Image: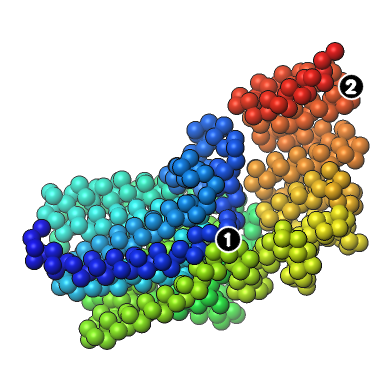
Amino acid sequence: MTVPALRARAPAALALGAMLALTCALYLPALSGPLLLDDYAVIAPLLRQDAFDSSWQELLFTATGPFGRPLAQASFIANALAGGDDLRAWKAVNLSLHCAIGMALYALIVALGRGTDMALQRARALAVCVAAIWLIHPLHVSTVMYTVQRMTQLATLFSVLGMLLYARGRMAPSRHGRPAILCAFFVCTPLAALAKETGLLLPYLLAALELTVFSRGEWPRPPWLKLVFVLGAGLPALLAMVYLVSEPARYLLRAYAIRDFTPLERVLTEARVLVGYLAWIVLPSNRALGFFHDDVRISHALFGEWDTAGAMLALAVLAGAAWWWRRRAPLAAFGVAVFFIGHALESSVFGLELAFEHRNYLPSAGIILALAGVAAALPPRAALASAAGVIILFSAVTAARTSTWGDAGRLYQSFVAASPASPRARMLLAEWYAVQGAFDAALAVEDGVPGPLPALHRLRVLCARDGVADADAGQVLAAVAATPVLEEVAVDTLTWLTEAAEQGDCALPGAALAAALDTALTRPLRVTRRYRLAIAAARLRYSQGQQADARARLERAAALAPHDPFPWYLAAEWAIDAGEHAAAARLLDEAARRDTRRRYSAMDAALRALLAP
């Protein structure tokens, strides 16, 4: 590269470097934050001493998503091996990825600017502004510092790199650009999808690029490109449709068994959620941004609910305007397309929770690009002043937010402040108070919150404080048993209460607790939680002197986890207690056969010692 070229690039490089440094400085206070939600299912198991006793397949492929997300899981394993339980190191990796995506986004916008005949210096200025605003946007704190969402980050990184490769491939001579385009489709897409399934949307982002930035005559389409789109986008979409339609009850509708809304209600509600996302992107505030958004009102009909109809109309107008102006304002049109395509999976018919901030990690870049593309039409000084004002404002909001994310107590309090009607937010804060020994504060947080879930958690706090539940425990457990959909946090709380009652740490109405467990086991649950619940139910029945019922439930647990030897060891212990030594010996042999990793060797030795003459 020549000296003049280096000098021309220096201002943009310095500006981008300054924004990366600012981003790191803003996020440093948040690195000491706690684990949250799915962190406990994905990250916490890797921090146990026996974490690597499992086979490599069990370690690398998780139950999260149909592909198992092995690429993201491999990064978590590397963190566990290198940094152990130092969560700051885990979150620092997320921050590094965030900065890497910002740099890739800068390179992409420069390429797209050149693709629309924008002057190089102007394209670099636009790219710095878009990348800077995206890097310091307050909305992304709950993605970068929510450790498990490295899945979203890796999928976003490979998606942005794929778009960059495609853009550069399209602007190169046909023969020279073909490898980059093929790599975008058939290398970056699988890598993104193996981090998170939203990576499967990359081919459609490339199609949006083709229909906006590269739709003009100066970028003639090579004859082979249509076949690439058929193989890279059309054929996977057709296969996915056949896959879902072949057994919709299994692949599409099963997820709704644990939801309190139907597929139609979800689609209607998501229109309002998407409009809310747009508001978060354009005008973020700490009062609006929290973490839990389980208090979203469900839309039941299009007609008769003005806000639902209005949201759908607004989204249709936005999409229509982008299509209408795709040739006159290709960057703005492409940005709007990124927003809609980025939400095509998580904000459509699939039975996921209704709203999460991390779903905007890539889509927000599209809206920022669209607005920046419009602002670029202003006089240079006005455009620069606008960008500087947004960066200063967003930096202040992000600084306030990251300082909160670094302290667990303040973080949980902020969740409640942002979503006061969220049962999960209140339960999390109450649990934190209880762990600190501030039981009265924990009870005050959940006081008056309607629904069986907060009431169930209140029993847990009372058990921890007094060793006995209040007189309403039977009614609470009956209400839980009558709930058609049990959230996983309710199952975890019910399991904790059962173990406390079985061990004599809390006095609970045994019959009501046993009935609640039996009903919970009939609800749609993940296998891992159903297994834990079945074990707890078996042990509770055994402590109540109902040996036959206990063994029946233990057999159910063993069927749920055929490779886990623990139910067999527990059955052997019960057989020894009953004096059935021959049966106990057979059960121990079966348990040892299943314990290929020798995780229960101490238990095996202790039980065999009891059998020794």
Residue 119 is at least partly visible in this image = yes
Q: Is residue 553 above or below residue 107?
A: above
In the picture shown, does residue 432 fall above or below 63? Answer: below
24 lies left or right of 302: left
Visible residue check, residue 451: no
Horizontally, is 612 left or right of 121 in the view? Answer: right
The residue lying furthest to the top in this view is 613
The quadrant of the picture occupied by the N terminus is: bottom left
The residue nearer to you, when weighing 83 against 413, is: 83
Tell me the distance, in whole angstroms, between the alpha carbons under discs 2 and 1.
50 Å
Q: Residues within 10 Å of mark 2 (few under 14, many from 20)?
A: few
Q: Which residue is mark 1?
A: 353
Question: Mark 1: which amino acid?
Answer: Glu
Q: Which mark is in front, 2 or 1?
A: 2
Q: Return the mark for residue 484.
A: none
Inspect the image, locate mark 2, and give the three-letter code of the amino acid beneath it: Gly
Q: Earlier in the sequence, mark 2 or mark 1?
A: 1
In-front residue for pair 543/338: 543
Q: Which residue is mark 2?
A: 579
Residue 564 spot, x, y in % from top left: 66, 31
Camera-side residue: 489 or 173?
A: 489
Where residue 88 appears, x then y in whole percent?
50, 54
Q: Position of residue 4 (x, y in %)?
A: 8, 66
Q: Residue at x 30, y 73 (%)?
A: 129
**Which quadrant would the C terminus be assigned to in this image?**
top right
Residue at 58 percent of width and 64 percent of height: 407
Q: Which quadrant would residue 418 be assigned to in this image?
A: bottom right
Say which element carries label 2: loop
